[in-house]
Image (tube, helix red, strand yellow):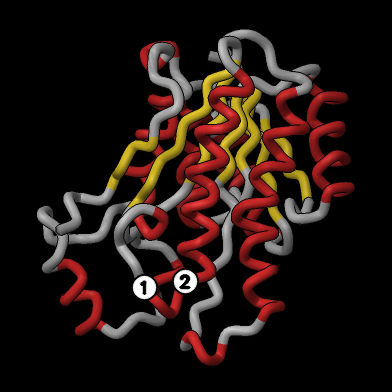
Amino acid sequence: MNRVVLITGASRGIGSAITFAFAKEKDTVIINYRSSEERALEVKNKIEEMGNSSMIVKADISNEDEVREMVKKVVDTYGKIDVLVNNAGIAIDTLVEDKTVIDFERTLKVNLIGAFLCARECKKYMNEGSSIINITSTNGIDTYYPYSLDYDASKAGLISLTHNLAVEYSPNVRVNAVAPGWVNTEMIKELDEEYIKEECEKILVRRFAEPEEIANVVVFLASPQAKYINNEVIRVDGGIL
């Protein structure tokens, strides 16, 4: 399609899967990362082996100046941004009594304020038919984990942000969200096997999602086939009970 697609947190996990999925559509992909330069370069090299143009951009999306510089670099190079995928996120899981204000603020700054900053800056360079897709979570809807209450709050806020931006940016830019349940990424590596088994029993398909299954939904929402879908939160959770 030859669109310019900016994906935040694109060096690993769901982010890299989304990047590869857009590359398969022949889009130009911008790989944002904060600290994993080596992994971002690996993603870039694989995409260029596919015959696609790509760029890596280092930026902490919770930093307003760095977001501005990232978007400026993309626009100076490609002249526009067609799709923004707000994927970058962190989780600092601790017992509720051990949670600190610093950790809570950091989670909100990356998962929620960072998404707002990226949307605000990218919108300035988006044309009719552009799309913003926020990666939220079922944790922000109805699957609650007290040790992740700051993460859950940030994802609920991201859903609210999605609705408000959809109203504000209509009719030219569509804004939707994807809410995954459990996904097989590095974030679950430290989970106990018995706990994973118990969680799978709550899912109708009895397994966690693969990152590519989330990426496929994101690419669809950004496509012309989804041009009448706006202001929606699409669950991709295997049927969590």
Using the rendered view, name the quadrant where residue 166 is placed. top right
Give the quadrant of the C terminus: bottom left
Name the residue that disc number 1 marks. 145
Q: Is residue 4 visible?
A: yes
The residue lying at 71 percent from left, 78 percent from top is 102
- Report the Cα–Cα distance between label 2 and label 1: 6 Å
Amino acid at pointer 2 = Leu
Residue that extends furthest to the bottom in the rendered view of this protein = 97
Q: Position of residue 203 (x, y in %)?
A: 15, 59
Left or right of 146? Residue 204 is left
Q: Position of residue 216 (x, y in %)?
A: 36, 34
Is the C-beta separation of discs 2 and 1 under 8 Å? yes
Name the residue that disc number 2 marks. 149
Q: Position of residue 20 (x, y in %)?
A: 49, 38
Tell me the SS state at disc 1: loop
Q: Residues within 10 Å of mark 1 (few under 14, many from 20)?
A: few
Using the rendered view, name the quadrant where residue 132 is placed. top right
